[in-house]
Amino acid sequence: MSLSNWVRKRNEEKEKISRLAPEDRLGYIGACAQCLIAIEQSNRHWLQRLSNPSFMSKFDEATLRVFFKRLKELALDNIEFDVEATRKDLASERKGRGPYA
């Protein structure tokens, strides 16, 4: 897929996700899945780009520093969310209730 097609598709996905407005429990589950799929697609694309030396040679160190800073922030935020949600799940198991009850 060309980079211009990738950008177009990602912008379409961004619009689709920004319009998500779940109305019930099942809707939230589906919307969460759509968000995770979009994140997964971006992560796969970044890994492909980072693994391609000829592509990455286009970027100077300052630009790579910016990429790293942003990706690091995303990773830390994602890990924080994961740990928080898992802790709530563990706490609910101990109490015999749902994680966010």
Image: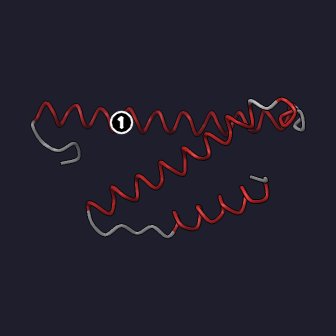
Secondary structure at badge 1 equals helix
Looking at the image, residue 81 lies above or below residue 21: above
Quarter where residue 31 is shown: bottom left
- Residue at the image point whose x is 54% and y is 47% from the top: 39
Q: What colour scheme has been applied to the protein in the rendered image?
A: secondary structure
For this view, does 89 lie left or right of residue 63?
left
Identity, as a three-letter code, of the amino acid under mark 1? Glu
Closest to the observer, 13 or 95:
13
Looking at the image, residue 6 lies above or below residue 18: above
Q: Can you give x and y, in whole percent of width and height, for residue 27 in the image?
A: 32, 63
- Residue at the image point whose x is 47% and y is 33% from the top: 79
Closest to the observer, 59 or 99:
59
Quarter where residue 30 is shown: bottom left
Closest to the observer, 87 or 8:
8
- Residue at the image point whose x is 54% and y is 33% from the top: 76
Q: Residue placed farthest to the front in the image?
A: 1
Closest to the observer, 54 or 20:
54
- Residue at the image point whose x is 76% and y is 38% from the top: 66
Quarter where residue 6 is shown: bottom right
For this view, does 48 lie left or right of residue 54?
left
For this view, does 10 lie left or right of residue 64?
left
Please count the marks in the image: 1
Q: Residue placed farthest to the left in the image?
A: 96
Q: Can you give x and y, in whole percent of width and height, for residue 99 in the image?
A: 22, 42
The residue at which mark 1 appears reads as 84
Structural crowding at the residue carrying mark 1, measured as other residues with C-alpha within 10 Å and reported as few (<14), some (14–19) or many (≥20): few
